[in-house]
Image (cartoon, helix red, strand yellow):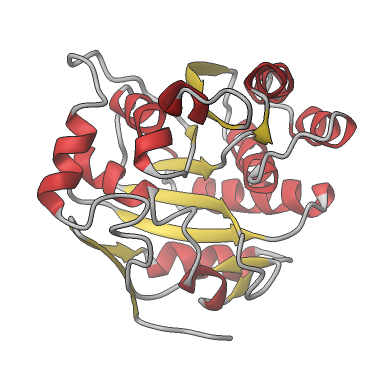
Amino acid sequence: MVSFKIRQPVVAGRFYPASAQDIKKQISGFIDAKEPKLDAIACMLPHAGYIYSGRVASQTLSKIKLKEKIILFGPNHTGEGANFSIMTEGRWLTPLGEVNIDSRLAKKILDTSEYLKDDSLAHAGEHSLEVELPILQYFKQDFEIVPIAFMSDDLIALKKVGEEIAGVIRELGLKDKILLVASSDMTHYEAQEEAAVKDKKAISAILELSPDKLMAEVKRFHISMCGVSPVAAMLSAAKSLGAKGGQLVNYQTSGDVTGDKSSVVGYAGIIIK
């Protein structure tokens, strides 16, 4: 086990601004007028640089009643750490302040899980969860997190982890106090038209709350969705907690920002209720 108490930001100044003022200014430019907030069990957010995917992530979170506890499901891009890595202690820092890990909840999930390992190494240089935190902090100042990183596409294991997490939430009576947040971008580096066709198939499976269909579509059509594993685990947990369906808030690509449609990355924001 590799452990550290304070997880420093590693992509501030690259994926998002380095100053709190600039972060707030950028996010405020992404969102529309205030709308009624939805009760949600979970959501999926993209995790690229804010200039590319920040609008999708911000618009999605702007429509959700954020909870006091947030379980973060993200892919492991670095290859470091265990296949199923949970942090159970410490704080994560961003330019907007610090966010504490809910150690009681995290340790209960760890103790219950057949697959999760207490491991900070997977999180040390990983951006997929870090980039969500300042947007979450923009909309809610006080919450705790449980960070989990996935580096396996074993669907049986992913669904089991989701069910284990849901079981702990029910046991502790926390269903109304927790939001599940899965972090994923969609198709990577294909022409916009092709990316949109592929991503529509993956999005449809997510809206149906089907981790089995999602994984099958991703493999069948070679969809380069980096967070398919955390999304599958999140869907399993959400279904176990009574989720009935999903809502697509926004879909766009990097090409919508740069104007270059020849090679894009897709971004989707989805609410699970």
Q: Position of residue 120 (x, y in %)?
A: 51, 76
Q: Is residue 25 left or right of residue 16?
A: left
Query: Residue shown at 28%/20% (left/top)?
Result: 37
Q: Is residue 39 left or right of residue 229?
A: left
Q: Is residue 260 left or right of residue 145?
A: right
Judge whether 66 appears above or below 233 on screen: above
Which residue is outermost to the left? Answer: 21
The answer to which image quadrant residue 55 occupies is top left
State the residue in front, 151 or 86: 151
**Residue 136 showing in the rendered view:** yes
Total label count?
A: 0
Judge whether 5 appears above or below 189 on screen: below
**Residue 177 showing in the rendered view:** no
Q: Position of residue 20 (x, y in %)?
A: 14, 52
The answer to which image quadrant residue 178 occupies is top left
Q: Position of residue 14 (x, y in %)?
A: 35, 56
Query: Residue shown at 48%/51% (left/top)?
Result: 72
State the residue in front, 28 or 191: 191
Judge whether 8 appears above or below 205 on screen: below
Q: Position of residue 191 (x, y in %)?
A: 67, 25
Which residue is outermost to the right? Answer: 220
Query: Residue shown at 28%/58% (left/top)?
Result: 13
Query: Residue shown at 58%/86% (left/top)?
Result: 1
Q: Is residue 58 left or right of residue 116?
A: left
